[in-house]
Amino acid sequence: MTHTQATPTGPASVGDDPQQQTPGTLPAARPEGEDAVGAARPALLATVGRELVQTIGAATQALTRLGDDVDQDIGVSALTAIGCVGTTPAETVRAAARFLRQASAIEVHGLLWARTPDGIGGWEHRLTMLISSVDPDLGETPGATHHADARPSRTVVYVDALAEHDVTVTAAEGTDHVGYTPADALDAAALTLDAVPALAVDGLLWAQVAGRRGLAGYRITVLLSRASGEAQR
């Protein structure tokens, strides 16, 4: 049986600190000028290539062990992960928008959000974008993008994997932002996050939607919650 499941590489980081680098990620280099770009490219490609081979190798081994025991279609592809790190949710999302404005041939397939300790008593916020490049001849990409209803009625289900029956259903608390480009949608979300610094970001959802006049648009949904007494920054 043929299996098809996207397997991303390790994320490259995009942030405000050019020297910032998290273990297991690519350097967040922001060179000035074409000479610097050319000098950085061999090391960058070597790192990406090594992580890509390791990730695809591990996924292929798991696929081999799986065999034909499942009916689902599972496989391996090489989506890339771009990591954007910031000290606030708004600046993190805005960094992703800046990157996409320089990447016209890139398609975004999904977003992952994480708030993690920064090692010095505070928090850092990381947005990981799963992306692929658009084939210049066919106009297609190897990844899939969720196509959502233009006006959803959304419910969130929380499932605790540590407890057998701990499931909570609640109305979604969040904001939707639609733009005709991925960068526009992210910039709109960043403006909202600027206005609600007391709320915590629990997750980001990404979808392609039908816009006005039949144009395709992109929607980012920001799931928010009130702080539980912890510092959010």
Image (spheres, grey):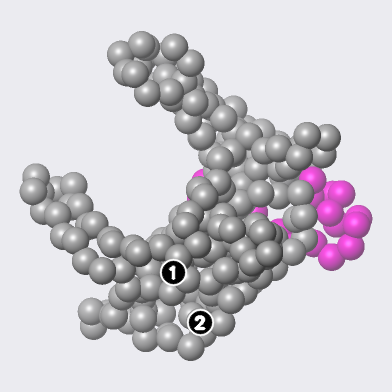
Q: Tell me the residue at 16%/60% (across/down).
A: 168
User: In the rendered image, which residue does mark 2 sit on?
Assistant: 192
Q: Tell me the residue at 31%/68% (across/down).
A: 172
Would residue 27 appear left or right of 127 to someone viewing this image? Answer: right
| Count of numbered badges drawn on the protein | 2
Q: Is residue 118 visible?
A: no
Point out the tag, 1 or 2, that comes first from the N-terminus.
Answer: 2
Q: Position of residue 109 (x, y in %)?
A: 56, 48
Quadrant for the N terminus, please.
top left
User: In the rendered image, which residue does mark 1 sit on?
Assistant: 222
**Residues at marks 1 and 2 touching, judged by CB atoms closer than 8 Å:** yes
- Mark 1: amino acid: Val
Would residue 182 appear left or right of 63 to someone viewing this image? Answer: right
Q: Tell me the residue at 55%/46% (across/down).
A: 145
Please provide the residue range marked out in magenta.
23-41
In-front residue for pair 175/86: 175
Q: Tell me the residue at 14%/48% (across/down).
A: 162
At numbered mark 1, what does the secondary structure look like: helix, strand or loop? strand
- Mark 2: amino acid: Thr
Compared with 49, 28 (above or below) is below
